[in-house]
Image (cartoon, helix red, strand yellow):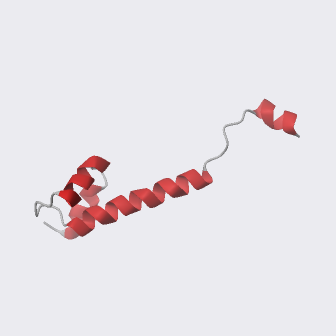
Amino acid sequence: MNIIKIQDQLKGVPDNTLVGYVQNPSGQVPTYLALAELQRRKDMRAKYQANKPEDKTVAEDLVEE
C-alpha cells in the first residue's frame, strides 16, 4: 500500500491503536508512521491548550473591568 494512503488512514485511528502499532509491530503499519501520527496529535493538542480561551461569562468579564 502507498505510504501516503497509510498515513492518511492513521489520522482516523484511535490513540490506543497507534500505540499498539508501535509496541507490537505487525508489518501492516510502519512504526515510524504510527509514531509520526502520535507526535502530530500531541502537537495539535498542545497548540489547542495554548490557544484555548478562558471559560468566563460575559458578566464575569464586565465585573472584572
Left or right of 16, for residue 65: right
- Indicate the position of residue 5 as horizontal and vertical percent values: 22, 63
- Indicate the position of residue 40 as horizontal and vertical percent values: 40, 62
The total of numbered circles placed on residues is: 0
Kindly give the residue lying farthest to the right in the view shown: 65
- Indicate the position of residue 65 as horizontal and vertical percent values: 89, 40
- Quadrant of residue 37 within the rendered picture: bottom left
Name the residue at 56% across, 51% down: 49
50 up-or-down from 2: above or below? above
Name the residue at 17% across, 62% down: 29
Left or right of 11, for residue 48: right
Left or right of 10, for residue 43: right
- Indicate the position of residue 21 as horizontal and vertical percent values: 20, 57
Name the residue at 30% across, 64% down: 35
* Residue 56 visible, this angle: yes
* Residue 14 visible, this angle: no
Kindly give the residue lying farthest to the top in the view shown: 59
- Quadrant of residue 59 within the rendered picture: top right
20 or 44: nearer the viewer:
20
Q: Quadrant of the N terminus?
A: bottom left
Name the residue at 10% across, 64% down: 27
